Image (cartoon, helix red, strand yellow):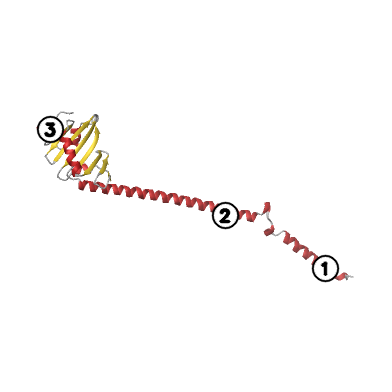
Amino acid sequence: MIHPSSRPAAAAVALACAAAILAACTSPQSISPQGGGVDQESATSTEASTATSTATSTATSTSAEASTEANKTREKDAREKEAVGVVAQRFSTLAPESFFAQLDECLAVDSDGSFDCSGPDVGQFQFFDSDAKAASTTQLLTELRSSRIVEDTGERVVGWSTLGTTVIITVVDNTTGQVMQQLMSSDKDDPRERIVSLGLAKPGGQATEEQQQQPAG
């Protein structure tokens, strides 16, 4: 039997226990609205971080690719400019410096010393370093009825050959065994004027009277 004086104490203990149980049940850390708010916020943060990392990686990759392409373009331009200098020095007897200054790019065609060069104002020219090519081209220029000679000093021959409306402008240096040629249409330019304007021969060059009067075939 509980003594009457001990009832308030027992009630106080019971109230304290009830308060402790209620506090544990209503603790903020135990509340998980809509199935767990803390976990959901953590997942959202992880997804955002991953997306940001992916976007940064993609942008870095794209920038690196663009930089690589730019470097390749610069290297290609540098090689072509360097090749122009090589051609200008190697074939210096075929054309004046003013002609080579108008070339933007040159590409080696093969290991035998052939080059394709071009410039916006002069068009495309081919250069050949071959004694056999020089000899055969000189023969064609001086013997074909379809050819015209603008200048002939014996070693240096400048002129053109015609096939329909296609013209082949040619400069030959038999001393060095070198040739330069350009294909053009006779419908657009006069070959003689073209040769003179490029500085490949002077007006009224040293062609013999027989060669100047040679009929077209």
Q: Nearer the viewer, mark 2 or mark 3?
A: 3
Along the line of sight, the residue nearer the viewer: 28 or 75: 75
Residue 211, which numbered label?
3
Along the line of sight, the residue nearer the viewer: 99 or 172: 172
Q: Position of residue 132 (x, y in %)?
A: 19, 43
Residue 46, which numbered label?
2
Amino acid on which the number 2 mark rests in the picture: Thr
> Tag 1, which secondary structure?
helix
The answer to which of marks 2 and 1 sits earlier in the sequence is 1
The residue positioned 57% from the left and 52% from the top of the image is: 47
The answer to which of marks 1 and 3 sits earlier in the sequence is 1
Q: Nearer the viewer, mark 2 or mark 1?
A: 2
* Quadrant for the N terminus in the image: bottom right
The residue positioned 67% from the left and 59% from the top of the image is: 29
The answer to which of marks 2 and 3 sits earlier in the sequence is 2
Q: Position of residue 15 (x, y in %)?
A: 79, 64
Which quadrant of the view contains residue 156?
Answer: top left
Tell whether 199 sits left or right of 77. Answer: left
The reply to whether residue 196 is visible in this rendering is no
Tell me the residue that label 1 is attached to.
10
Q: Residues within 10 Å of mark 2 (few under 14, many from 20)?
A: few
